[in-house]
Amino acid sequence: MNPFTSVAAALLLSLPGLAQDKTPREFHLANGATVKGYVVGLKDGRVQMKTIVFGNETDFRRKLADFAPASQIAIESSVCRLDDFDGQFAIARHAAQLGEMELTGVHARLAVKSVMGKPEEVEKTNQVKQWAAGMLEAKFEQLLAAGHVATARQVLDILSGRLADQVSEQKLAEMDERLQAVAAGRRAKPADPKSSPLADAERASLKKLLDAADKEFRTGLQNARKTVTAVKHYEAAIARYKQAWKEIEVLLNKHAGSEEANTELQDLSHHVVEGAKRAALQASTSLTMQSDYKGAMEWVNKILAHDPSDAQALAMQRTIVEAEAAASGDWMWGWRTAGGDPRQNVARPDQGRPR
């Protein structure tokens, strides 16, 4: 994610001409073909374009549905005014249906921006936020049911950070508990526990530490609207994750000769690292929401002190810079995958289809 020279601005640069720009651009069909040209009109699901063939313009007509998802949204955006709330909101909803989450965020932001300073600003902004929260909740359930833990976690982190005022805190905690249960079910386990040198008591001790850390994290979610309290619990979660890591480290050394034990312990260490990072990022997001940019940056720097190349931490670092510079809520709608290509998708696990 590169939300920091301005998330929205960076994404908007990738959108084909808003408001009838005649600069030729590439559009991709679902069958893999590429069309270069500009959009002339869009009506009843049919696209009229001028394409460039051997340097000459020619008419090109096709169903919107014949285009790859990102190009469908690009075509719609090219004929929608920036101040058209209904149009931008409709594009956001269509992008969500197509699984284009980064473009969903862009057009949700544009919809909100179109009513800024107008009498209906509060009503329309709340309408977009309520829809976004409901859509992301549904997306989370779909991903979790399909076993896509990492992308479900990203969606939940958006909900519990940028849209926490739209979801009950208890529900956020319950969603995370279910997420952790699915993640635990996917960790490596010995086919026969007796074949591993790890003792039941060692496993139980680790589980107790990890459960305590996870509980502190969820208590932070349960206080998502009370920033100071939430941050304290995220800090406590990190301390417990670190305690769990110390115990894992001891057991890794103790059972260094066992591949089974090492595989099991390394999977648990991934949970520890991911949990601690999530807690720090949630603390940073909570503080950014309250415009405490200095405090937010301190939390990000704690991650970077251990891993200077961590993509999510670098993304959050740039988010904070962008949020402080913009002094607005624009950054809330930057839903791209941290550290990824801007064409990647936060909530679409299948990356192989045509775009």
Image (cartoon, rainbow, N blue to C red):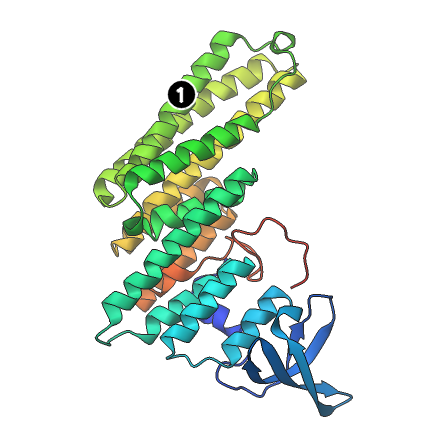
Q: Quadrant of residue 303?
A: top left
What is the secondary structure assignment of the residue under circle 1?
helix
- In the rendered image, residue 165, in percent from the top left (x then y), is placed at 27, 50
Does 273 appear above or below 104?
above
Residue drawn at x 51%, y 44% is: 142
* Left or right: 3, with 197 as reference point: left
- In the rendered image, residue 90, in percent from the top left (x then y), is placed at 44, 69
Q: How many marks?
A: 1
Label 1, residues with CA under 10 Å away: few <14, some 14-19, many ≥20: some
* Left or right: 125, with 132 as reference point: left
| Most distant residue in the right direction | 54
Does 200 appear above or below 35?
above
Q: Quadrant of the C terminus?
A: bottom right
Judging by the rendered image, the residue that carries numbered circle 1 is 209
Is residue 42 at all visible to an observer of this figure?
yes
Residue drawn at x 35%, y 46% is: 160
Q: Quadrant of residue 41?
A: bottom right
Name the foreground residue: 245 vs 79.
Answer: 79
Does 133 appear above or below 213?
below
Name the foreground residue: 174 vs 319.
Answer: 174
Residue drawn at x 62%, y 7% is: 194
Residue drawn at x 52%, y 45% is: 151
Q: Name the residue type under label 1.
A: Leu
Does 172 appear above or below 255?
below
| Most distant residue in the front direction | 44
- In the rendered image, residue 250, in percent from the top left (x then y), is placed at 50, 17
